């Protein structure tokens, strides 16, 4: 006889994806437990970049000010294959910048946010097995304890135990190249570093030293081959490769953190099998070029959270949870393709170098530069909601409304009807969808229905048509 249901959702992995998902579920009063195999948070301080869409998500949930306090804004440019171009004109966002922030800081912020909302986090816990039935999932931990939940979500990284136990295929390409990356002090003047880097980058795009503040540099250099990534690199590895590629090791010393990454590229066959789902690196891996990995996982969680909560609260339409894979799997496939292309453009071979020169010229056209930036920063995503205006299926920017800014109305994770006509209503869906009548809203449409993730689900002024879309995304109206 199965154990009694103790939780609605158990999440394996308390990285950015798992923590964001836990917070999104708790907004809808879902009972959440997060299991994290590491007993302590990661100690190394690697800087990651929050792209425009992830920054928008933070604003939608009232987290932006806390995140901005701990990060550093940088221009939204130079992401695609590290080709240096200015910020393109016409970016459709009120948050058109990159936010550099230490990875442990963003993980800590999101984890504490989830805990504040009521999520439980248990460290030092590893999923060893599970079995699902029609009513839930029984999970066996490595220490022999058993837990019972309605749903299990694997956010446990590239080597996901949940994905392997689930038997989901993870096709793609193994790593062909490897790159060393770390932060350390240097022993030569900045002018010498700049001159050497400029010369080496004429032929080696996977090489750079960039100032990290306080006399330290972020160092990136190609490795000699593909090694066991479980073995962390040493300072001697960096010194050896720097001398081999640049003819000098720049006197590097006193490393703060050292890591290695490869260009393995894989995408899970399925994101859901019954009551078990995958998100983040458990569902997709790719080279870090363009800085999309953390962002892609957080955006997975944002897409999944409200849908899974709707399923648990009992108002989800029959196909709502299936839209998670239908929407996010193609997005990940596109990210994998653009990172494959970027890695080719970093090759020192004559052919890829010629293509890189051609693309560099084409990116002088603002439309090309903007299109590639929208791809990297995820603000160009359009989900397939059927025929309609171009805005349908896209996210809506943080427009001005009479109460301030649109995203301030999305903090609770509910849907929103933005009505410029004053004639529309959400009727029996008012327990799931908010309504703002505002003829002054900066919106070139009479009305729009936003899902909790900010994507436009309907555009128009016909109440009957609106009711159909309310039912499509938010289930039956309350009686």
Image (cartoon, rainbow, N blue to C red):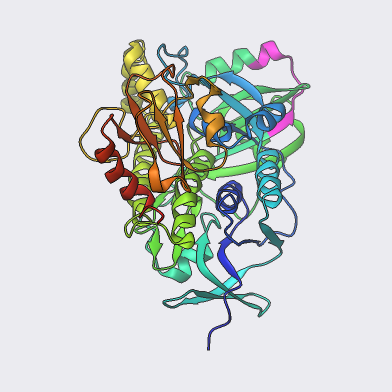
Residue 29 horizontal/vertical position (percent): 59, 56
Depth order, front residue of 353/163? 163
Q: In the image, is 124 to the left or to the right of 88?
A: right
Residue 159 percent coordinates (x, y): 52, 59
Q: Quadrant of residue 333?
A: top left
Which quarter shows the C terminus? bottom left
Q: Residue at x 72, y 43 (%)?
A: 44
Q: Residue at x 25, y 40 (%)?
A: 464
Residue 344 in the image: x percent, y percent? 37, 33
Nearer to us in this view, 115 or 317: 317
Query: In the image shown, does 103 or 325 lie closer to the viewer?
Result: 325
Query: Going by the picture, which residue comes out furthest to the left?
Result: 387
Whether residue 50 appears in this view of the structure is no
* Residue in the image at 36% along x and 59% along y: 270
Magenta residues (range)? 183-193
| Residue 431 among magenta residues | no
In the image: residue 432, left or right of residue 267: right
Q: Is residue 466 above or below residue 128?
A: above
Q: Nearer the viewer, residue 80 or 248?
A: 80
Rendered location of residue 104, percent (x, y): 69, 42
Q: Give the total number of marks visible in the rendering.
A: 0
């Amino acid at each position: 006889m199965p154990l009694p249901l103790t939780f609605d959702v158990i999440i394996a992995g308390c990285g950015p994806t798992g923590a964001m998902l836990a917070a999104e579920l708790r907004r809808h009063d879902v009972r959440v437990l997060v299991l994290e195999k590491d007993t302590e948070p990661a100690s190394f301080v690697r800087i990651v970049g929050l792209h425009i869409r992830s920054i928008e998500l933070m604003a939608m949930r009232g987290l932006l000010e806390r995140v901005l306090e701990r990060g550093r804004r940088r221009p939204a440019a130079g992401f695609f294959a590290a080709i240096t171009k200015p910020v393109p004109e016409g970016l459709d966002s009120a948050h058109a910048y990159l936010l550099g922030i230490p990875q442990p800081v963003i993980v800590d912020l999101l984890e504490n946010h989830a805990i504040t909302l009521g999520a439980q986090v248990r460290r030092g816990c590893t999923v060893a097995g599970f079995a699902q039935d029609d009513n839930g999932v029984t999970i066996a931990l490595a220490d022999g304890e058993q837990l019972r939940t309605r749903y299990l979500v694997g956010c446990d990284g590239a080597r996901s135990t949940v994905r392997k136990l689930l038997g989901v295929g993870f096709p793609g390409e193994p790593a062909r190249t490897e790159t060393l990356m770390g932060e350390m002090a240097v022993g030569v003047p900045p002018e010498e570093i700049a001159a050497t880097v400029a010369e080496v980058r004429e032929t080696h795009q996977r090489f750079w030293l960039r100032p990290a503040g306080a006399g330290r540099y972020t160092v990136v250099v190609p490795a000699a081959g593909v090694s066991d990534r479980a073995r962390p690199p040493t300072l001697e590895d960096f010194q050896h490769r720097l001398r081999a590629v640049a003819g000098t090791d720049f006197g590097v010393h006193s490393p703060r953190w050292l890591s290695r990454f490869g260009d393995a590229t894989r995408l899970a066959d399925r994101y859901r099998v019954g009551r078990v789902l995958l998100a983040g690196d458990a569902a997709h891996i790719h080279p870090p070029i363009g800085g999309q990995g953390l962002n892609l996982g957080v955006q997975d969680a944002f897409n999944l959270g409200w849908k899974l909560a709707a399923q648990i609260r009992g108002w989800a339409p029959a196909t709502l949870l299936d839209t998670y894979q239908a929407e996010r799997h193609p997005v990940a496939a596109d990210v994998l393709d653009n990172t494959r292309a970027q890695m080719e453009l970093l090759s020192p071979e004559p052919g890829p170098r010629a293509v890189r020169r051609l693309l560099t010229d084409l990116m002088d056209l603002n439309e090309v530069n903007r299109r590639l930036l929208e791809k990297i920063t995820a603000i160009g995503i359009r989900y397939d909601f059927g025929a309609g205006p171009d805005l349908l299926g896209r996210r809506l920017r943080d427009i001005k409304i009479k109460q301030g800014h649109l995203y301030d109305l999305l903090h609770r994770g509910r849907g929103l009807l933005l009505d410029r006509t004053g004639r529309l209503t959400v009727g029996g869906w008012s327990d799931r969808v908010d309504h703002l009548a505002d003829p002054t809203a900066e919106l070139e449409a009479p009305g729009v229905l936003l899902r909790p993730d900010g994507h436009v689900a309907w555009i128009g002024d016909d109440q009957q048509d609106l009711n159909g879309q309310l039912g499509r995304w938010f289930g039956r109206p309350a009686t």
